[in-house]
Amino acid sequence: MHNVIHTCFFGVIQERLALPQHINGIASYDKQSVDASKGRQVSAFVIQIQDDRSNPSGREDKRIDPPTKQAPLIPAEPTAAETLATMAQDLKAQNPVPTPHTPRQHDERIPSHDELHEMKKTAAQGVVIVAVPQLFPTPPELADRMVELADIRPGQQVLEPSAGTGRIIDAIRRNAHGCAITAVELNCNIAHRLRTVECVDDTRQADFLDCNGDLGTLDRIVMNPPFANADDIKHIMHALKMLKPGGRLVAICANGPRQNDTLRPLVEARGGIWEELPSDTFIGAGTSVRTVLLMLDALPR
């Protein structure tokens, strides 16, 4: 009975609203209410309208109510263990553990604290620090005196076999002209600097004691050799072998027992010069070693 009424009721709505034929409606009985003015019961209906084109099977679809909004979830309180773990991570981030430090290897080229202290004391006394072992630059006044004694003449071959910083070479350039200069220096850095000096014709980076016939024979040799272990005796005796007949050697040597026993008799036998120098001659180079200025000539043919 209700189905007939529902269908008739929807047909009236469809006709009044002029709905297309493919729109179907299903009227369902919802509830009863009482019309107070007429004192009779009236049925209320809910009309569900659907489009047959979206539902070709013609089956009755169930009504789907929109989802109800849920209240936002309140995050749960962290447990005591989770709180302690978070605090530990924060402390670790604020106070990182230092990475292990690899000790720096000692570089022998870097002076120690004690060595720097000694250098500071020496510098306060006005003494120049010597950077290369056994390098004691010749004072300019003494270098000029040595060149004067050598009596260098134009066209002569001159050797400085322990050139160092070039103090004697500078004196030759000031006091002699027209000669050819050969310099020998063991230290590679100093030898490189000597190659930039215009008046030096040939620079050899070598140990002078290893130089033999490659340097040829020379007219003049002016030198300030190393003193350690009586090396000055070895250098001077080696240089004498390179002099031309009638050539001349002028040198500085230590004023010690071995030098007096070996070199002094040779100088005196050839009528040369053996002149003891003041003890403060090399004080500017950081030493007060006692030294001698000597000069002797090669034997004639």
Image (tube, rainbow, N blue to C red):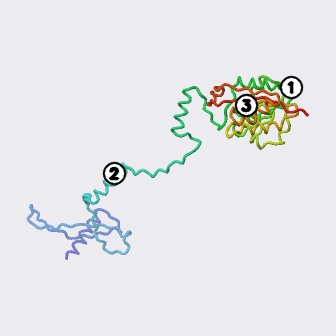
- Residue at 36% x, 71% y: name it: 55
Answer yes or no: do the residues labelled 1 and 3 have beta carbons within 8 Å? no
- Tag 2, which secondary structure? helix
Q: Sequence order check: which comes first, mark 2 or mark 3?
A: 2
| Residue 38 visible in the shown view | yes
The answer for how far apart the CA atoms under marks 1 and 3 are is 24 Å
Q: Nearest the camera: 257 or 293? A: 257
- Tag 3, which secondary structure? strand
- Residue at 83% x, 26% y: name it: 152
Q: Sequence order check: which comes first, mark 2 or mark 1?
A: 2
Residue 128 x, y percent position in the rendering: 61, 29
User: Looking at the image, how many numbered discs can be counted on the residues?
Assistant: 3
The amino acid beneath tag 2 is Leu
- Tag 1, which secondary structure? loop
The amino acid beneath tag 3 is Ile
Q: Is residue 74 above or below residue 174?
A: below
Which residue corresponds to mark 2?
A: 91
The answer for how far apart the CA atoms under marks 2 and 3 are is 72 Å
- Horizontal arrangement in the rendering, residue 80 relative to residue 183 (left or right): left
Q: Nearest the camera: 60 or 157? A: 157
Q: Quadrant of the N terminus?
A: bottom left
Which residue corresponds to mark 3?
A: 252
The amino acid beneath tag 1 is Pro
Comparing labels 2 and 1, the label whose residue is closer to the camera: 1
Which residue corresponds to mark 1?
A: 154
- Horizontal arrangement in the rendering, residue 76 relative to residue 23 (left or right): left
Crowding around mark 1 (Cα neighbors within 10 Å: few <14, some 14 to 19, many 20+) is few
Answer yes or no: do the residues labelled 2 and 3 have beta carbons within 8 Å? no
- Horizontal arrangement in the rendering, residue 54 relative to residue 33 (left or right): right
